[in-house]
Image (cartoon, rainbow, N blue to C red):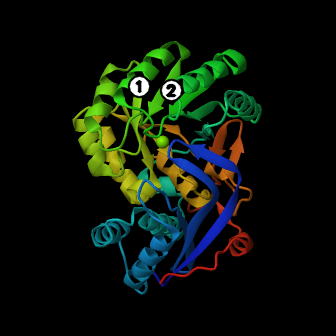
Amino acid sequence: MKIEKLEYIPIAIDRSQVFKIATGSELTAENVMVKVHGEDKVGWGNASPNSVTDETTESILKAIKSMKKDIEGRDIDIEEFWMEQREKLPDDRAALAGVDIALYDLKAKIEGKRVFELFEGREKGIVTDRTIGIVSRGETVEQAREFMSQGFKALKIKIGLDLFGDIRRLQSIREEVSPTLDMWVDANQGYTVQESFTLCQKLNDLDIEFIEQPVMVGDEEGLKEVSLRSDIPIMADESIKDHKDAERICYNDMANLINIKLMKCSGITGGRKIVDVLEDYGVNAMVGCMGEVVPSLAAAAHLHMTSGNIRYADLDSHFMLSDNITSGFEFKEGRLWTLDQPGLGIDILEDKVEEYKMGLDAE
Ligand SMILES: [Mg+2]
């Protein structure tokens, strides 16, 4: 695939509400849009700065500028380019994700296929949760009711700052909102191993689907201990960035489930490498997101469609933004759908991209 040009555009969109989790709060979502041109088509992707891969908008711009030099005018194979850049820029995972996603959108458009078809996937509507940040018990109940009325079939509740307060928040959803709603829980590394044991025990009769990352990244023995002793499945998130981490976690039985995020694993190429590991070990996964705009969420939805081992989707970051820079990523009766057209199946609203453009450039 011959690449003629790569453009990058940093954008900032306000969140519709402050989103608080165990590791911090955020008011705006910054993303770097990536646009690649080749063979008379255009592909789009985006990179999202985040604390998990320790990337900022500035570092992403710098990395993409370097990739631009390496790709323009070249005839590339996506996976070869990906491997070359992983080696060259090992710390710029989200930046590479943005470029990788744009390249797959372009490749699929050139071949007249939808992205999941490049991997022999099958179309489906993706059930996504809606996330409730760390808020009071009353607000938790109120938001849970609101999201259910919007059609969401699953809720992910952020916890990790107040063990017994968190348990009460979760009990309140069961008692006051719904006895049957799918409930997922994310502690974002907020607890010690001992607190995690207490949490798992106290939540046992609440029918919780899984608990994400109860303990600190790096405490892999702790994660393993909690996973072995908990009756509720434990999902690794911050502890797994790429297929090498997935291999280590699966081989050592450190977690029951894996959270794949394209920003951590450097895009669709990295996501597919994780899926290969999970399929070998028979481990299931979720696709997640972090403060992303729609192209990378649509890419994660396509990845979901390529493997039966991906069972869950937490693709809701666009619902938390005050505006949308795309059309075509529809939410209907609890499920997300991409358009039946080549590529990622979304349309970029370029005037919106222009409207939210930041006055930044790579150094
Ligand atoms: Mg998480």
**Disc 1 from disc 2: Cα separation:** 7 Å
The amino acid on which the numbered mark 1 sits, given as a three-letter code, is Glu
Residue that numbered label 1 is attached to: 195
The amino acid on which the numbered mark 2 sits, given as a three-letter code, is Leu
Q: Does 267 sit left or right of 13 as displayed?
A: left
Q: Nearer the viewer, residue 83 or 207?
A: 207
Q: At 51% from the left edge and 41% from the top edge, which residue is drawn? A: 22
Residue 231: percent from the left, percent from the top?
39, 18
**Numbered circle sitting on residue 183:** none
Residue 182: percent from the left, percent from the top?
59, 26
Tell me if I can see residue 207 in this picture: yes
Image quarter where the N terminus lies is bottom left
Q: Relative to 216, say whether 68 is above or below.
A: below
Number of numbered markers: 2
**Which of the 4 quarters of the picture holds residue 275?**
top left
Residue that numbered label 2 is attached to: 163
Q: Nearer the viewer, residue 90 or 286?
A: 90
Q: Relative to 100, say whether 242 is above or below.
A: above
Q: Secondary structure at mark 1?
A: helix
**Residue at the extreme top:** 205
* Marks 1,2: beta carbons within 8 A: yes
Q: Secondary structure at mark 2?
A: helix
Q: Residues within 10 Å of mark 1 (few under 14, many from 20)?
A: some
